[in-house]
Image (cartoon, rainbow, N blue to C red):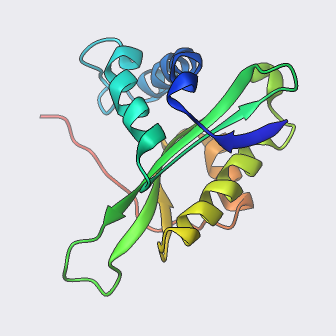
Amino acid sequence: MDIRPATTNDVLAVLPMVRKIAAMHEQLDPAKYGYRGDPAELYHGWLASRASDAQSVFLVAETDDGKVVAFLVGTVEREIPIYRLRKFGFIHDVWVEEDYRNEGIGRQLVTSAVERFRELGAAQVRCDTVWDNATARDLFKACGFRPSVVEMLIEL
C-alpha cells in the first residue's frame, strides 16, 4: 500500500468515500450532520483546493494496481489570539474502505499526516470524532491522541 499526497486527479476517486463517511456521520448524529445536499458535490471543489494548498494535508492510500482505497484530509488552522499556540493541524476526515480495514492503513494515514503537520510548523494536531464512533477514537488513541474537549449540542 502506498500512502502519498493526493493530487487533483485523485478527487474523483475520493468522492464516493466522502459519501460513505458523510452517511455514517449522518446516521450516527443527524442533528449535527444534516447535509444541504450531496456531500460529495459539496466537497469536490474543497478537496481539489486541498490538493494544491501548501497548508493542507490531503493523503490517499493506493493499492499496487493504482486503486485509491483510503484518504485523509486536514488543514492548518490559526488559533484565536488569546492562546499561546498560534496554529494547529486539524484532521477533518479519515476513511478506509471496508475491504482494506484492519491492515494499519488508517494508522499510516494519521501518522503521516501528523508528520506533515509537524513539517508545516503546527505544534498540535486536533480532530473531532462522532461520540458513538469508537473505532475512530481507538485509531486516534493508538496514534497518540488524547481526549481534550467534549462538544455538546442541544437542538432548538
Q: Nearer the viewer, residue 29 or 20?
A: 20
Q: Nearer the viewer, residue 37 or 48?
A: 48
* Residue 86 location (% of width, % of height): 32, 78
Q: Is 97 positioned to the left or the right of 42 in the image?
A: right
Q: Which residue is drawn at 54% across and 39% down?
A: 132
Q: Residue at x 36, y 72 (%)?
A: 87
* Residue 88 location (% of width, % of height): 41, 68
User: Which image quadrant: the N terminus?
Assistant: top right
User: Which image quadrant: the C terminus?
Assistant: top left
Q: Residue at x 69, y 42 (%)?
A: 4
Q: In this view, does 138 lie above or below 146?
A: above
> Is residue 147 in sight in this rendering?
yes
Q: Residue at x 48, y 77 (%)?
A: 123
Q: How many labels does the image show?
A: 0
Q: Is 38 positioned to the left or the right of 99 in the image?
A: left
Q: Is 52 positioned to the left or the right of 144 in the image?
A: left
* Residue 6 location (% of width, % of height): 59, 36
Q: Which of 38 and 14 is in front in this view?
A: 14
Q: Residue furthest bottom?
A: 84
> Is residue 96 in sight in this rendering?
no
* Residue 33 location (% of width, % of height): 34, 29
Residue 22 occupies which quadrant of the picture?
Answer: top left
Residue 7 occupies which quadrant of the picture?
Answer: top right
Q: In this view, does 52 lie above or below 117?
A: above
